[in-house]
Image (cartoon, rainbow, N blue to C red):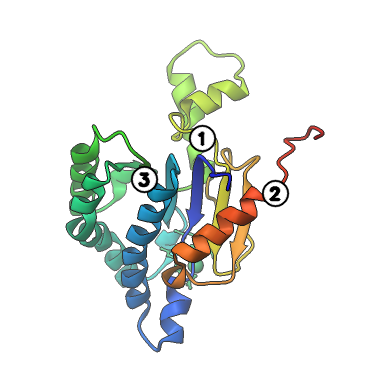
Amino acid sequence: MNIPQHIAIIMDGNGRWAKQQNKPRSYGHFVGTDNVRNIALKADELGVKVLTLYAFSTENWKRPKEEIDYLMSLPAVFFDKFLKELMEKNIKIEVIGDLSVLPVKTIKVLNQAIKKTKHNSGMILVFALNYGGRNDIVEAVNEIIKKGNITAITEQDITNNISTKNYPDVDLMIRTSLDYRISNFLLWQLSYAELIFIDCYWPAFNGEKFVEAIEEYSNRQRRFGGLL
Ligand code: IPE
Ligand code: IPE
Ligand code: MG
């Protein structure tokens, strides 16, 4: 099996999954959060270098305040439960997106996890939080402008200044729940990723289904515009 270096996942369907179980949406988010651990450990075991998970988009602020508040409390729940295990696996936590407007407590919990795992040399687990692909490109351009005296920029300039500058390009993007869209995820970085849409809500996605997706990826021919 050809293991992608960088996998990005749109963890979608928590609400629909909860509805199916006659539970509130928050329960879906809670179980979905536990599932982050399962998929991260599986990715690590398979030898994935970077796993980027879409946790909250710049558009998710449109949701009811109670749901947003609950989502913002989940990083604390996640790291309380699993940071120790992630440390043992030598996994490094990083974040992309604009953290500055998140609740202070959420920022603190994230920064603690980032700091604690900073020297880990294993898989990088990236949470995309208050992340938007368009904003990411705009911020990259702003970074370039800040460096001064610019009349034209190159693709390489954007790649070097975007949030994922330290990671390889995304090889495989998985979206659960069968909505066939990118929803403002890594627009720049997905340009040649293989896309797989899975008929399963995020809380029910598991290691076995993850391996199946990677098998499907392995069987694809990546031509990058050329010929084989
Ligand atoms: C994904 O599940 C989690 C976030 C977007 C934060 P949803 O909450 O979008 O669940 P559905 O798509 O409504 O089922
Ligand atoms: C994308 O899911 C964002 C995350 C999974 C964090 P959404 O549920 O917000 O996307 P749309 O609204 O279906 O496009
Ligand atoms: Mg959704």
**Which label lies toward us, 1 or 3?**
3
Q: Where does the image place residue 174, in percent across and percent down from the top left?
A: 55, 56
Instruction: State how many labels appear.
Output: 3
Task: Relative to 159, say whether 195 is above or below.
Answer: below
Residue 74 is tagged as none
Q: CA distance from mark 1 to mark 3?
A: 24 Å
What quarter of the picture does the C terminus occupy?
Answer: top right
| Residue behind mark 2 | 220
Q: Give coordinates of residue 202: x percent, y percent.
A: 46, 68
Please report whichever mark, 1 or 2, sits nearer to the chain's N-terminal start: 1
Q: Furthest residue to the top?
A: 149
Q: Classify 10 Å Cα crowding around label 2: few (below 14), some (14-19), many (20 and above).
A: few
For the residues marked 1 and 2, what is the alpha-carbon distance in whole angstroms?
A: 32 Å
The residue labelled by disc 1 is 138
Can residue 198 be seen in the rendering of this structure? yes
Q: Amino acid at mark 2?
A: Arg
